[in-house]
Image (tube, helix red, strand yellow):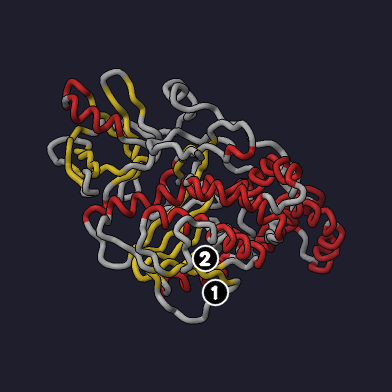
Amino acid sequence: MPKWIVSAIEQCLQDVQDKPLLLRERQTFSNYLFSRRLPLGDSDVKKMYREIEYNILAKKYGDLETIDDEFEIEKRRKIIKGEAVNKLKQCVYDWKPIEYNAYKSYLYMITRSVPEYAVLDTIFKEIQLRNPTFNPKSMFDFGSGVGSVLWAALERWNTINEYMGIDISADMCDLSEKIISLHPKKYKKAFFRQFLPVSNLQHDIVVSAYSLMELESAKSRLEVIAKLWKKTNQYLIIVEQGTNAGYKCPHKNPCPRLHQNKGFPCNFGIQYMPLRLLGPQRQNFELYSYVVLKKGNPTSEDNWSRIVRPTLVRKNHVRCRMCTSEGQLEEVVVTKSKHGKPFYRCAKASGWGDRLSIEPNPSYEGADAVVVTPNENGESDISASFESVDVSFKEEDPFAAGYKEAIPRPEKLKRGKNNLEPSDIESQDLKPIYTSETPYVSK
């Protein structure tokens, strides 16, 4: 985290009257945000109620098909209506929009600033590596929050001469303006609004980070994405929590990680150091899911596979578990003795989220894989090829033997207020994992 952001946050916290309460509620608020689910649509709720109603009727009165009298069936439905409604309330997530007043805006700032900055900087870095000549001049940020998208973008590009941030909370917009006003270069090209503009003026980068889950229906989310796509000139970036509710998958096919591996969503992990102004801290991990959509024709690089679990480094071999462009999970093994030290080192240096190029080889069952890494100019060079081993891909506990030396186990999610029940935490099995990226440490 750049020093100016830490300094700006410290300065903003001076205006908070009850700072101890703010710090105490930080972890509970973080857990609540991570546990949020998407609200069910009316049709889904009605369908669930009918199923609950049918099961209760069948349990109390037996097979309903034997009853020909519709009046009698309707009478029994009224009798068990209260029981069915109570059961429905237990099954349906009580989604409510979060209204960010001044206090909650500060709470969001100290809770989410660092992990969101770390995630966004990683995504922008990948865009830089894949498109080193890209120099965006304008940016549109839907659900801008405290402005973490702009912070990360300004650290990667100095060409952004127009930024438009949209957040429905006036207090959040005021806080964002205060923070960016403390930028060392006196950045004065940021504008914040509460509502989407009617015009379809296009921007080089359009971002929706941790915002879509705050919309009340699938229809409204799709409408917003369609509007954002119209405003996109080059890149549309969508980021959410790396949970079953927030995951994104770029495949046209069903996500193989979610559907083949016991509900593990398509996500990635990054480690970061919380703000030191909050007292002694230890490294935390952020699970996130994202997709980057680019306008234009696809290239061959777009079909490269991506490592979707941490690489397993063993004695004289490395195992890389990947999701291919066809939407399949494969495991590739590279050995030092067969492929040489340079190839082995390249595979060993690859981590969760890195890309590999896999091409089928008709001479044997399996596939050839080419490890591709960017050079100093951001261009990609083929540096190794190694053989795929035909083994089944299965999820493992990331804290099993082989990971422990690299990954400290994070704190377990604690039960808090705001409807945070143990059943609401969808990703307790999704332990955050070490990433090959440099830890983001506040200084």
Please identify the residue farthest to the left as the structure is shown. Answer: 363
The residue where tag 1 is placed is 196
Q: Position of residue 187 (x, y in %)?
A: 47, 63
The amino acid pointed to by label 2 is Phe
Q: How many marks?
A: 2
- Which residue is drawn at the image coordinates 57% and 40% (left, top)? 275
Q: Residue furthest top?
A: 315
Residue 217 relative to residue 202: left or right: right
Is residue 388 something one can see in this rendering? yes
Dot 1 crowding, Cα within 10 Å, few <14, some 14–19, many 20+: some
Please report the residue visible at 74 percent of the width from the left and 48 percent of the height from the top: 419
Rendered residue at 68%/59% (across/down) = 98
CA gap, disc 1 to disc 2?
A: 8 Å
Q: Is residue 357 left or right of residue 410?
A: left
- Quadrant in which residue 351 is drawn: top left
x and y, in percent, of residue 280 in the image: 61, 31
Task: Return the x and y of residue 276 as percentages of the image width and height.
Answer: 58, 37
Mark 2 lies on a secondary structure that is: strand
Which residue carries the number 2 mark?
142
